[in-house]
Amino acid sequence: MKKTYIIAEVGPNHQGSVKKALKYIKKLSRIGVNAVKFQIGVAQEHYSKESFKPKYQIKNSKSKSIISEAEKRLLNLSDHIKLYKECKKNKVDYICSAFDLKSLKFLYKNTKFPFFKIPSGEILSLDTLNFISKKNIPIILSTGMASLNDIKKTIKFLNRKRKKKIHLLHCVSDYPTNNKNLNLNFIKNFKKIFNYPVGLSDHSLGFLAPIIAVSLGATIIEKHVTFNKNAKGPDHKASLTINEFSSMIKLVRSTEEILGKKEKILSKSEKQNALAVRKSCVSSKDIQKGEKISKKSICFKRPGTGISPFSYFKFMNKKSKKFIPQDTVLKLNNFK
């Protein structure tokens, strides 16, 4: 089984501190994440004066102005070069969601990344989608708040010049997501509908959902991470601590090992155990030399080191080459 690609989403949880963002990379690189993900944007480029907060942000943050709050938690564009270099130094992938075209172009020009990450809120943003569609870089597409029709339109638009390598993320954009709204059974159907690999961008509490998602075939797990769940900001409460994230990774890897392959495989120990617990053809009485073998001459008993009960017909009506005592495991070379 190919290993699940695990993304630690720092998002805005660095609270506008590049020093803290760099610390996240160092800490996360030690626990086995594949990528550390950030968000980039210029507030004035993607918020109009009529913008308002979604309910979860009002609940999780006291600031009334969405623009002023965004400016506080967004890093300068140039800071992302530092983050990219730090990721490279610590041998983890750098991934970043861009909220506007200016930021996206900056990322493309100044950093290298394995995927364009299209966040749920940008799934219908034609300017950024158009830019991404012209580049030969794989895409991770989050689908929170999107209908199937929204997803179809976006995929069609991205593929209009050439078929893209797209990874879809099942996502529920609620922070935190109630378990009853996760709908993880959709993961398998999602893959069938679009014929693309499917992962999970999870905002539920704890990490049971990612483990279940992996068992359902998720190829990517994206989960928010924080140093402090009680810190100010919109995403901390739906995030895992570093220690929790580490535990999640260990369980994901154990789940992959337990799931194994799609083929039926007998382990070495099973083959050895079969010799002890399966049955063979055994003499049910003393068999004289030259005696013709009949059904009355045999029974089936452990161990499985002799002739299989399914092969008893191979020596029916044959004669014994020698005297065989009662309760002896029979071998084909006993008969002629």
Image (spheres, grey):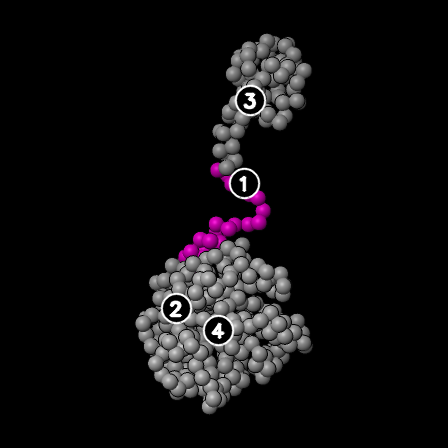
Which of label 3 and label 2 is nearer to you? 2
Q: CA distance from mark 1 to mark 4?
A: 41 Å
Mark 2 neighbour density, 10 Å: few (under 14) some (14–19) many (20 or more): many
The residue carrying mark 3 is 300
Q: Amino acid at mark 2?
A: Ser
Residue 333 in the image, given as x and y percentages of width and height = 62, 20
Main SS of the magenta part reads: helix
Could you tell me if residue 138 is visible in this image? no
Q: Residue at x 49, y 86 (%)?
A: 46
- What element does badge 2 sit on? loop
Q: CA distance from mark 4 to mark 2?
A: 18 Å
- Image vertical order of residue 215 relative to residue 323, above or below: below
The residue carrying mark 2 is 239
The residue carrying mark 1 is 266
Indicate which disc, 3 or 4, sits on the residue closer to the N terminus: 4
Could you tell me if residue 278 is visible in this image? yes
Mark 3 neighbour density, 10 Å: few (under 14) some (14–19) many (20 or more): some
Q: Amino acid at mark 1?
A: Leu
- What element does badge 4 sit on? strand
Indicate which disc, 4 or 2, sits on the residue closer to the N terminus: 4
